[in-house]
Each structure stands twice: as C-alpha cells, then as structure tokens.
Image (spheres, grey):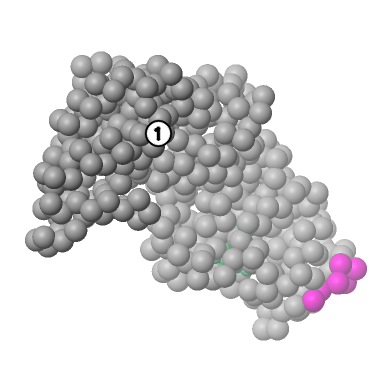
Amino acid sequence: MNPLATVPLPYNALICRYNEIATKGKNRTHFEDLLVRGLRRQLEGIGKLRITKERGRIFARLRDEKARFTPEACQILRERVPRVMGAASVSPGFLVTPEMSAIEETVDTTFMNVYDAYVQSRPKNTQIRYAMRARRNFKAFPLKSKEIEIHFAERFLHQCPQLTVDLNNPEMCVDVEVRHKRAFISYERIPGPGGLPTGSSGKLLALLSGGIDSPVACYQMMKRGCQLNFITFHSAPYTPPELLDKVGRLVTALNGFQQKGRLIAVNLLPAQKLIRELCQDRLRTVLYRRLMMRIATHVARMLGDQALATGDNIGQVASQTLENLSVISRATDLLIMRPLLTFDKFETVALANKIGTFDISKHEVPDSCTVFAPQRPATASILEDVEAEEAKLDADQILTLCLAETHQLELPDLTPIPLTEPRKRSPRRA
Ligand code: ATP
Ligand code: MG
C-alpha cells in the first residue's frame, strides 16, 4: 500500500516530466502539445485543467484556482499516468512562488503528515529512508540545489526519530524544483511509460490475434508515439464467437493507452478453403500469412495507416523463421513493424501483465491459424515456390472474397458496421 494514498494533502498542481521529448530540436513544441493532449485525455476525470508548458516541464492546475486535487483525483492519477505515452513521471504537489519562505511554509505544513503516514504504514520503530532532492534552474535563487537539500535534510530529523537520510535509495522523498517563475514541492513521483506522445509517430494498422504477443507489440508501438487501428482474422463458424469477444476486450484494453482506434474483423474462411483445396499443404501457413498481409495492406490504405505491426518473434513458430518472415514480408510493400522480434517470452509475458492484457489473452480460444493448419508446415519456404502456389489461385477473386467478409466491429458490443474511410479532420490544437 502506498502510504501517500492515505494522506489527504491539499495539492494545488501537477508537474509532468518528460525525457526523450527534451532531445527534440525545432519541432519540440509539436511533441509537447501532443503530450499535453494525451495528459488531458487520460486525466479527464480529475477536473478541468489549466496547463502551462515550461522548458522541460508541464504544469497543470485546476481552472478553479481555489480548488484542490482530492485524494480520489490522486488515485485516478496513479492509475492513469502509466498510460500517458511520452510522460516520464507526474507528481501531484504544491506550486508556489519561487521564494524560500514560500517553499519552507509548504514543507513545514505538510512534511509531518507525510512522515506520519509512512510511520503508520510499517512495523513500529523501523527506519524510514529519506532524501531531499532539489533542482534549481533559476540561477538568481539565493541557495544552490545542494544548499536547499542540506537546508531541508536536517530540518526534521530531530522531530522524526525514524527518519534516516539515504540519498541513494530513499522511500520517502521530498522533491523541490525552483524555476524562474515558480517553485514546486512534491512527495510522490508516479512513473509514466516514457517514450513519445500518442500521435507523434503516425498511424499503424496492427495485426491483432487473441494471443499474448500481438497486444504487447501494439503497446510497444504506442509507446513510440504511434496511433493504432487493429485488424483481426477469424474463420467463423470454425472459430467460436468467443474469439472476437476476446479480441474486442484486448482492443478496449489497448485503446486505454491512446485515442480510440478501430477494430476491423476479416473472415478468412472462404479463402482458407480455396487454399486448402488448391495449394500444397506445407506452404499453407505462409500462404495464409501473405494473404493476411495483402488484406491488411488494403485496409491500411483505406484507413490512412502508413505501416503494419505484428507480434512476430524470431524462431517462435514455423511462420517466424527468417526465411518465412522474409517471404511473408514480400506480400506487401508497406513497412512491417515487429517490435517483439528479439523479446524473450518471459519479457513479453511480464509486459502483458503490466499492461493488463495477459489475463485476457491467457484463455485459449481456437484462432484462425489453427483452422486448417498443416501437420508439417514448411519452416524455410522459398519465394518462387510460394508464388507458384499463389498462381493456382485467382488473387483478385480471393481478395474480393475476403473484403466482402470484412467489417468494422463497434466496441464493446461488436456490432458489425461497414468499413468506411475516415473523415478528413483538421488537426486539433492541444
Ligand atoms: P500472438 O500472441 O500475437 O498470437 P503467436 O505467438 O501466436 O503470437 P503467431 O500466431 O505466429 O504468433 O502470429 C504472429 C503474428 O501474426 C501475431 O503476433 C499477429 O500480429 C499476427 N497474427 C497471427 N494470427 C492473426 C490473426 N488471426 N489475426 C490478426 N493477426 C494475426
Ligand atoms: Mg497467434
């Protein structure tokens, strides 16, 4: 239990820190604006915010200057900040004028409450590792960062017998930032995912199965600033309705990290039957995958998505050998992002747990790949052989067949609606 969750402090502001955006040159403002937009979207429930950008930091206050962030708002913050792509961390805290007296007053009126909460949260008489961290980039401020730290480090030691200074591994930490126009004091850093803000790296169409890997691949791409739509392939009635239900829940979970993306579902069954009838068994998996790529490419162009993403992982299964991956890649001229290529399965599962998709993915439901899967799939297919098999099929006819079985599914009820091109919108301001 986070001891700070039990202290109702009258926070008047939030600070959002970022890392990678700080390395951006001329277009840094664009990235900052997208981060602000992401913050607003995720923090909708905590009240109307007035946001100020300052080099390297974003400050948010409530529009109503007299209002304070409630403990409930702080709880929302702890849940949502890990979803704000591009944010390194966010702290609720106290925004005051950049004067020592104002900083002292804030620390003096809040410190003991925080200390008591730490004391309550642990067995009697155990030590609480404590640090004071100051950062001053307002050079006219009379004390340097180190001096501010020393000033506060010892201020409370005599009244707080369980405190012990530990600068390397503190549990309780007071952060003071002194800037040109304001100072900020906080006791809690809520870690964000880092990376780049949603929408800063363009749009992708992600191939999402009900498995463990592809949702994690989607998260990795979102963390690099991509906005995702999702496409899934099923083989109803050979695959059960639970499959789409599961994919729908995965999309809902993933949409929690971005602006809502669409879910497109394609019934591959008519095409799978033709491939089973006409083509060599051992190449079936690669043929299905190339067909998925072609359909995904068509849909991506329609939706204005610039690239595809998959959860492929080198050597995991027959379709993911270097040979097969390269033959599959040749079915599209779109760039294919495969962020999990080098992941260990344990890393993928850990991340799936962290982002909340593992519990949805772990229930096994037969998917499109298991329908008509060959007994012995080729692990090293050759492009010419695969193309020779495809020549036995009428490529246009197959694509038309599949597109006739392609729908957008509304969430959460999965009502199929026709697939339409997105409306052109003028870019919104942050
Ligand atoms: P996953 O957990 O993503 O299902 P996997 O280990 O089962 O991964 P494969 O089934 O070989 O891997 O699929 C590799 C990738 O191909 C998936 O990560 C996904 O991006 C895409 N893919 C596979 N099957 C489907 C499907 N039915 N619909 C959409 N994409 C799929
Ligand atoms: Mg799969």
Instruction: Say which of 353 and 211 sits in front.
Output: 353
Rendering coords of residue 132 (x, y %): 31, 42
Q: In this view, does 338 lie to the left or right of 10?
A: right
Residue 93 in percent (x, y) is at: 28, 32
Tell me where the magenta segment starts and ends, as one range.
Answer: 380-385
Name the amino acid, label 1. Answer: Ser
Tell me where residue 331 appears, x and y as whole percent.
79, 56
Ligand 1 within 8 Å, label 1 CB: no
Q: How many labels does the image show?
A: 1
**Magenta-drawn stretch contains 282:** no
Which residue bears the numbered disc 1? 145
257 up-or-down from 37: above or below: below
Instruction: Please determine whether, in this image, residue 270 is positioned above or below residue 218.
Output: below
Q: Which residue is drawn at 67% across and 35% down?
A: 304
Q: Which of 149 and 213 is in front in this view?
A: 149
Residue 52 in sight from this viewpoint? no
